[in-house]
Amino acid sequence: MFHRHFDDYIHHSRGDHGHHGFGRGPFRGWRSRGGGFGGREGRMFDGGELRYVILALVTEKPRYGYEVIKELGERVGGDYSPSPGVVYPTLTMLEEMGYASASQDPQGRKLYTVTPEGEKVLGENKAQVDAIFERFGDREDNRGPGFISVRRAMLNLRSALQLRVRGRAASPEQIQAIVDALDAAAKTIERV
């Protein structure tokens, strides 16, 4: 509640009534509702939607929890990765409800498969599940061609920076080389 009121206060106090992003210029809207790199405001899924999505993924083929996380991230367009703290309890809940079953492999990992009861529930909610997956497609379509590739490159850059700068003490010369490389990349992108 506070977040919403705070956004409205900032939005109106700036006299900036045209968008909900980070100001004017090329980064405007990165945090906007329903678009940009920030995604939709609030949670990705409403109510029990995640349960149906995970059940649908397990219906396609048996999956381990980490495969569910990876596949879901790819289906949403690469800019969302569900938390293991959400996915694994949901898989356990599906198992307890009798909609999925799990078998352990020799390494102790659980492989989840759908049960007949799970297929029945998924069939009864097919329209809702189809609408959720269609929404994922709309998110990707709204971003334009190449968005996923750009997003992947940005995440690679972020990881490289974190490993180089945070992971170990970088010398002043290394820091300057990183700054120069980032400045050069920004200039190149501006010219494209």
Image (spheres, grey):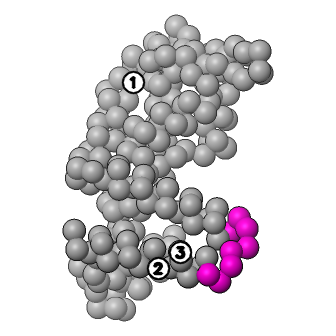
Residue 185 in view here: yes
Which amino acid, mark 2? Answer: Asp
Which residue: 38% across, 76% down?
Answer: 184
Q: Which mark is residue 125?
A: 1
Q: Please state if 183 lies on the left or on the right of 160 as rendered.
A: left
Dominant secondary structure (helix, strand or loop) of the stretch shown in magenta: loop
Q: Which residue corresponds to mark 3?
A: 178
Q: Position of residue 25 (x, y in %)?
A: 28, 81
Q: Position of residue 129 (x, y in %)?
A: 37, 29
Q: Nearer the viewer, residue 149 or 3?
A: 149
Contact between marks 2 and 1 (CB within 8 A): the answer is: no
Which residue: 29% across, 47% down?
Answer: 140
Which residue: 52% across, 7% down?
Answer: 116
Query: Is 104 within the magenta?
Result: no
Please identify the quadrant where the C terminus is shown. bottom left
Q: Nearer the viewer, residue 7 or 56?
A: 56
Contact between marks 2 and 3 (CB within 8 A): the answer is: yes
| Tag 2 secondary structure | helix
| Tag 3 secondary structure | helix
* Res 183 quadrant in image: bottom left
* Res 100 quadrant in image: top right
* Res 165 quadrant in image: bottom right
CA distance for labels 1 and 3: 51 Å
Q: Which residue corresponds to mark 2?
A: 180
| Tag 1 secondary structure | loop
CA distance for labels 2 and 3: 5 Å
Which amino acid, mark 3? Answer: Ile
Task: Mark 2 vs mark 1: give the one in front.
Answer: 2
Which amino acid, mark 1? Answer: Asn
The residues colored magenta run 166-173
Task: Mark 1 vs mark 3: give the one in front.
Answer: 3
Crowd tier of the residue under label 1, counting other residues whose Cα lies within 10 Å: few below 14, some 14–19, many 20 or above: few
